Amino acid sequence: MSPGDKKRLATGLLFISPWIAGFLLFLLYPMASSFYYSLCRYPVLRPPQFIGFGNYARIIHDEYFWKALGNTAFMFIELPLMVVLGLALALLLNQAVRGMAFFRTIFYLPAIVPVVASAMLWLWIYNPEYGLANVLLTKLNLPGLRWLVDPRTSKPSFIIMDLWAVGGGMIIYLAALQGVPEHLFEAAELDGAGAWQKLVHVILPSISPVMLFMIIMGMIGLFQYFTQAWIMTTPRGGPEYSTLFYALYLFQNGFEYFRMGYACAMAWVLFVVILGATVLVLKTSQRWVYYEESR
Amino acid sequence: MKSKTVKRRVTLVVVYGLLLGFGLLFFLPFLWLVTTSLKADDAVFEFPPYWIPSRREHITVEGKLRGVYTLEARGERLKVVRLGDTPRGARVRVLEPPARAGENLLVNAEKLTPVRHACFRWENYPRALKTFPFLLYTRNTLYIAILCVIGTLLSASIVAYGFSRLQWPGRDVIFILVLATMMLPDQALVLPRFIMFRHLGWIGSFKPLIVPAFFSTAFDVFLLRQFFLTLPGELSDAARIDGCSEFGILWRIIVPLSKPALATVALLTFIWAWLDFMGPLVYLNDENTYTLALGLAAFLGRHGADWSGLMAAGTVVIAPIIVIFFFAQRTFIRGIALTGMKG
């Protein structure tokens, strides 16, 4: 390493030292522990017993593991929907039109209603007999659906519910839109660009780093989808296990069946999957993400 | 130029139409939260559900309290009281109009609609706020939330700067490690994390909830890193040529240009800390240190849930966030975007 490299390495490490310290203090031990547990039989109430890769071998033959993985993968339909909807909302709400502050608040509300309350809300909305959803459908002369109780519509029900909370991502897009350089708009206008072209050639490239963030965070979040499914489905796992998501099954193994070792093994399998997917997205991102900062 | 004004008007109409339409859809569940908070306890789960908080009318007939309904019969609207149900239908007695009062009829139960009177139970709110030490919990929650915001803003901006505005060997590999820390599900970390904090003697204090924020979280580092990368590199280069230190660049150039991003981080951190339930549940054991989220859980007690109280308390807990968001929007939205470059 050249002396210049060494100096830059030192500066770099200095700046990220808070994170490194935090990692060593608060993350390393729990992560290493959970990996050790994954190599054990750990009924929680008794100490862990080392069994090597036994848990991992059992995972491969566990039909619920594969079912849970499939259910979680299905939810990825939500990713492009959330990205597009969040961005569309942000664009819509970025106008300097009167009352915008009010509308932005309304669209952001769902993201801050506590999960327990919103879960109860949506349980009511999705009630096949008197829920708001079917009431609206019948008003439009469409047949009512059985939503959460029907294995075919259970996962889409969750997707719709998540789309309602798109306001959370919307504010990140709003912040990103503030950073689009004004002079580029002027240049585009001079070149005769219409609204759509301005969107595609000026706005999207300028906010592409933030879009990458939303996509990766969305992915990481979807792989770990848990809370709503846990609150809203009884029996847990939903009709024909159609809503048995990976993190839910993991939780059940660890905290309901007291198979913490198996749960940790599931966690590390998920870790590898998410890591692989993220690295893939990052590598392909070099093609479409535009960074102003010369890298 | 008339067509341009027409075009703008049409765009406005479309925009407002979309906003109002979808806005209503988005607002409905929250409206349900608020209206339920004003209902009487036994009325919360009434079937069929209704929007405006109200009570059903009852009168005493033959010594018992019975429900009052309206009945649509052969073009006439009758007000009846329900005496009982038989396999062949519901027995009712007509109350109005006076011409037919006293008549006893056997009708199809489905034709009866309950008579309701609007009744807003504002008392639910004071009652809900007395169910747990509201002011104390608010103070605790505020303390935790504010410290988390300060810690996160300080640490995440410094760390994000290191990953975005500096070039150094191994930077991107270590960044993937940062991302990787978000990829292990919390459920697998909860137990060892608790054990670790217990070894440190931090269980029962606010420390597990506040201290990690000062070491930055991967989420905020990632977010700020992406934002910092949208600022031109030439800004840093020019400053370096002028002899500015890296920290000076961060403080005097990057931070002022990143207000929307920093405001977003501050808001998201505050909201997360304000509503966090799992953390306080696991790490706090002295009731005097409890937070609002735990206070809400008090409504789901052993004797069944106090739903209207829960909704009322929930509304009060969310209200500050809504207010903060509404008034903080100016920091998010600036009219004209500047990147510090001219031309």
Image (tube, coloured by chain):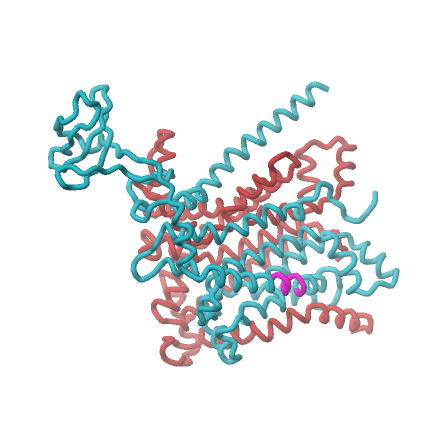
Chain colours: A red, B cyan
Q: Position of residue B119 (x, y in %)?
A: 35, 40
Q: Quadrant of the N terminus of chain B?
A: top right
Q: Quadrant of the C terminus of chain B?
A: top right
Foreground residue among A294 and B320: B320
Left or right of B28? Residue B322 is: right
The answer to whether one can see residue B58 in this image is: yes
Residue ID at (71%, 56%)? B228
Magenta stretch secondary structure, dominant: helix
Q: Residue furthest right?
A: B242
User: Residue B49 appears in which quarter of the rendering?
Assistant: top left
User: Residue B133 appears in which quarter of the rendering?
Assistant: bottom left
Left or right of B186? Residue A141 is: left
Q: Is residue B113 above or below residue A26?
A: above
Q: Is residue B150 magenta?
A: yes
Residue ID at (46%, 56%)? A225
Q: Is residue A45 magenta?
A: no
Foreground residue among B81 and B63: B63
Magenta span of residues: B149-155
Q: Position of residue B126 (x, y in %)?
A: 42, 52
Left or right of B234? Residue A57 is: left
The answer to whether one can see residue A269 in this image is: no
Q: Position of residue B208 (x, y in %)?
A: 53, 71
Foreground residue among A151 and B154: B154
Q: Is residue A125 above or below residue B19?
A: below
Total labels drawn: 0
Q: Position of residue B223 (x, y in %)?
A: 63, 56
Foreground residue among B258 and B209: B209
